[in-house]
Image: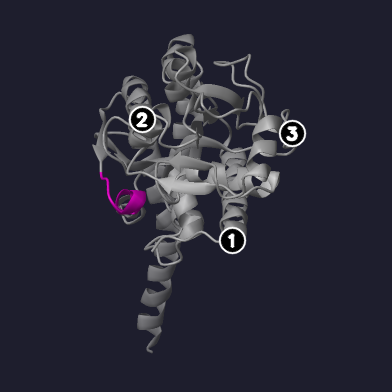
Amino acid sequence: MRKAQRRRFWLYTVVTVFAQPLASEALAQSYPNKPVRMVVGMVAGGGTDVTARLVAQKLSEHLGQPVVVENRPGASTAIGTERVAKSPTDGYTLLMLSCTTSVLSAMRTNLPYDLERDFAPVSMVTTAPLVLLVHPSVPARDVKELIALARSRPGKLNYGSSGVGGISHLAGELFSLMAKVKLVHVPFKGGGESVIASASGQVDMNFPSVATATPLHGAGKLRALAVSSAKRSSLLPSIPTLDESGLPGYDLFCWWGVLAPAAVPKDIIAQLNAVIGKIVNTPEMKESINKQGMEPQTNSLEQFAAFMRNEMAQYAKLVKLAGLKIE
C-alpha cells in the first residue's frame, strides 16, 4: 500500500471509530422525533396488551410523540418478539415482554432470537400473582388439606391451564413438584376457557390471575386457597401465600416489562427507564394497574436485567425437572 493510501486508510479508520459514538449521542439527544412502536406478541385484550396500552398512553404524553401499540400474535409470542429483535436499533421499536415469552425461551431452543443477547432490558412495569382456585366440590378448605387429598388420590385430581408452556401450566407443575403429588394437566386454548371449565367443575383446580380469580371467589363459584407469590397480594390481602400454606419457597408470578433491541444507545434506554419509572408510580397509573388485577413494579436497568436472568434460569430449571416441551 502506498504512503498516501495508508494515510487515507488510517484517517478513515479513525473517523469511523470516533463517528460512531458521536452518531449515537446525536440520536439520543434528538430522541424521540417520530412515533414509537410498542409491539405486543399477543392478541388485543389480554394482560400484556392492556399493560402495553396503559404504558403507551402515558409514555406518549411524556415523550411528546405517539406511542402506538402493535399486536403481532402468533407462535406463543415468538413472532412479535422476533419482529423487535430484528428492528432498527434506534429506540423507535419496543417490546412489551410478558413472563410467557420468558417461559417460551426456556422451553424452545430453536427460537430465532435470544432474549439475553438480542434485547436490552428497559424496565419492569407490573407484576401479578396467580391464585390457586379449587371447585367447591373439592373437599379441601386449605392447601394442606388439598395436598393430603392429592396424595390420597394420585393422578385423580386435575388442573386447567391456558395451554402448554403458559405461566399457569408452570404454576401447576411447580405445585406438583414441591408438594410431591401427581396432578393431571388439562390444557385449554386460553385462560378464559380454562377458568370457565374450572367454574363448571370440568377441572378441579386452576391458577388464574388475581383479576380473574377475584369475582369467581367472591361469587362462591371457586374457592381461593392461596396466592402464588412470596408476598400476599394487596388486592386479596386475606388470602395466604403458598409459601405460608405449607410449600415454603414457592414463589411464581407473572410480570411484564419493556425491552428494546440490544444495540439501542444507552442514553435512550436510560431515558425510557426514567420516564417509565415516573409514569408507572403516579397515583393515577397505580389505580389503573390495580383495576387490572396487577401491581406496579419498576426498577433500574441493572435490577431488571438481573431479575430477567434469574427468572429465566428458574424457568429453565423447572421446565427440565417437569420434563416439559413445546412441539
Left or right of residue 139: residue 38? left
Q: Nearer the viewer, mark 1 or mark 2?
A: 2
**Mark 1, residue position:** 320
Residue 146 % position (x, y): 64, 33
Viewer-proximal residue among 179 and 269: 179
- Residue 196's tag is 2
Q: What are the residue bounds of the magenta stretch?
A: 72-80
The image quarter containing residue 224 is top right
In the rendered image, residue 271 lying in the magenta stretch gets the answer no
Residue 113 % position (x, y): 40, 60
Mark 1 vs mark 2, CA separation in Å: 30 Å
Is residue 247 in sight in this rendering?
yes
Give the residue type that dot 1 points to.
Answer: Lys
Mark 3 vs mark 1, CA separation in Å: 24 Å
Residue 287 % position (x, y): 45, 12
Establish if 250 lies above or below 13. Answer: above
Residue 143 % position (x, y): 66, 30
Give the residue type that dot 2 points to.
Answer: Ile
Viewer-proximal residue among 261 and 70: 70
- SS for callout 2: helix
- SS for callout 3: loop
Who comes first in sequence, dot 1 or dot 2? 2
**Mark 3, residue position:** 246
Residue drawn 48% across and 23% down? Answer: 222
Magenta segment's dominant SS is helix
Who comes first in sequence, dot 3 or dot 1? 3
Is residue 265 in sight in this rendering?
no
Crowding at mark 3 (Cα within 10 Å: few <14, some 14-19, many 20+): some
> In which quadrant of the rendered image does the N terminus lie?
bottom left
Residue drawn 62% across and 42% down? Answer: 175
Establish if 268 lies above or below 285. Answer: below
